[in-house]
Image (cartoon, rainbow, N blue to C red):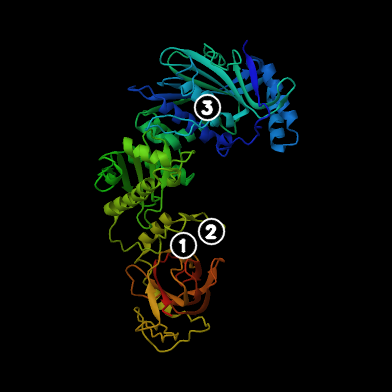
Amino acid sequence: MRQWRFIANQNSMFSGINDAGIETFTADLTRSLVRETIQNALDAAIPGYAGATRVEFSLFQLPVEEIPDVGRLRAAVAMCRDSNREEPDAYRFFVRAAGTLDGSSIAVLRISDQGTVGLEGSDTCAKGTGWSRLVKESGSSNKGKDSGGSFGIGKSAAFACSDLRTVFYSSLDVQGLPSNIGVAKLISFQDPDLGWTTGVGYYSEDERYVAMRELAALHEGYRRKASGTDIYILGMHMDGDFKTAFIRAVLLDFMVSVVKGKLEVLIQDEQIDRGTLAQYMARLDPHESEDIKALLIYHHILTSPDPDILRIPLDSRVYGQRYGFSDGECTLYLKEGEGFGRKILITRSAGMRILEQDRISGSIEFYGVLIIDGEKMNETFKKMEVPSHDAWEPGRCREDREVCAGALRDLKKYLKEQVLRNFGKANSASIDAFGASDFLPDRIDAPGQRGLEKSELSAGIKELVGKEVAPSRKRARQLGLIAGGPPQEAGGARGRGGSPRASSSLPGGDREGGRTGYKKIDVKKRLTCRDVSKGMYVLDLISPSSAKYGKMVFALSGEQSELDLPVRAVQLQGGGSRAKIVKTAGNTVYLQDLTKGAPLRLGFQVDLDGYYCMMEVDYFASKK
């Protein structure tokens, strides 16, 4: 007889509310569900099928009394609640779940795919079949090398979205065999007949918990005619506008799949495909967030005939030959432009977003897309993919750790070299002080201000250098020196701008002309304008060495690069270093007690209020 059946744990393990697989997807339910279900559908595409895989998301209300054997399910939920009163999280969850089943109707999300093989193996339900891996197995997956998933936990995303942790699977496989079964992943509860249970229950024909030989009929008016799988999420948890949230998730994570013609998505009455994609992109506001701005540019890079967009197929002699990669296993698309965020979107064969590689260049403004299509390259990087499919970690590869680590390290190097080779050039409007991308974030927010980005700072400087700086020579000389402690001033050496430049006395006998006490050291720095109206800036760097004394020498850059730039109101900010300022003299700041690797954040003002200032900063440390 068809009914819900739960399994006794026979005095073995107890299942709690914090199931590891389900908890993986609770941070962003909508996006996780879209990523996992679409990825699974793409992986199940019919071999040799020429069309796009089609995935439909349809939300509807189902009368509670039409849930199969709702009485037993309601009783199980109540026992979960009553058996776990001393577990606050579990108790609250099942109080809400019981309330959901006490209503007259329940929200159900149907997820249906077409152009897929369906759940093969439902006739035997044997271990290793597609049916068994989805319905019964935990942590197993035997997908192909080109598939997007490999951990077998993606199916938990559907349970994470259910306020009842209950799902029905219904399928028609490529052989025309129908099947359906209900699965509830509750928590251990005490049953008067079974004792303590595992919390897992199946709606099936009998105690064998095998598939029923017909399609589920939960959504009135819907009937599957072609092969594929339907997932019904009972008690779908919804926050906000359903269509808007799901459309956004599809665009963010599967734009490349749609562009390549591999995927079509229907969300209620909204269809996203290769022909309509541009319409949905046009609805997005690039000022909404950095993610949306980048998405629009990625779409432009992949679809525009713009001759400035570079398309670079892999030359394995440049990268990959040592790892067995062949020519053309990946393709890199690049475009340079003002305000671009210096990132490369990376996808593998199915086209799902994996990650955005940043920290490629601190001065070149560009966006890029890398599509990994080749079998060997896909296989290598799939091994490193974390379960959430949004990062690569070579440590996951127990047998090939060194090979994987090398492939990832050299890929990053390859991407950087391609950017520099194609866009690197002498540019007087750009200096390294504005691009410490290796150790600083892409975004620095000032209190009370809109976040200032590196790209915005560069754009402003390019327009102003050489136009507003010239009058500063006279004004700079009017600044007085801020008195301080040792080192003491001596001599009257002239700096490169013609103004008096300080010479200090240090152990080792520092004389500014010969620099016998100081050694110039190249360091990466980041300059941020905090308040242009007051000429306030912040300089960030990492101390490259330990030294008793050090100094920073400031000068204007660009067309007036020979002009010293006096600074004032200098102070160290943050608590990451024991260094202290001992003296400020004109365009030079003297420091003491520098520690290797410690972050230094220097706040200061220049007498160029109202204009962006582009400057050079030289760093020196004492030799002793």
Answer whether residue 518 is visible to the viewer in this image: yes
According to the image, label 3 marks what residue?
137
Q: Residue at x 46, y 58 (%)?
A: 440
Secondary structure category for the residue under label 2: loop
Image location of residue 419, percent across then percent down: 31, 51
Circle 1/circle 2 CB separation < 8 Å = yes
Distance from label 1 to label 3 (Cα)?
53 Å
Q: Residue furthest front?
A: 11
According to the image, label 2 marks what residue?
446
Image location of residue 195, percent across then percent down: 72, 24
Is residue 327 rendered to the left or right of residue 246?
left
- Mark 3 surroundings within 10 Å by alpha-carbon count, few (fewer than 14), some (14 through 19), many (20 or more): some
The residue type indicated by label 2 comes to Ala
Query: Which residue occupies the foreground of this view, 107 or 172?
Result: 172
Q: Residue at x 65, y 34 (%)?
A: 17
Say if 381 sits above or below 545 in the image: above
- Of label 3 and label 2, which has the lower sequence position? 3
Q: Residue furthest bottom?
A: 491
Say if 215 sits above or below 289 in the image: above
Query: Which residue occupies the foreground of this view, 385 or 163?
Result: 385
Say if 59 sits above or below 326 in the image: above
According to the image, label 1 marks what residue?
528
User: Can you tell which quarter of the image residue 174 is in?
Assistant: top left
Circle 3/circle 2 CB separation < 8 Å = no
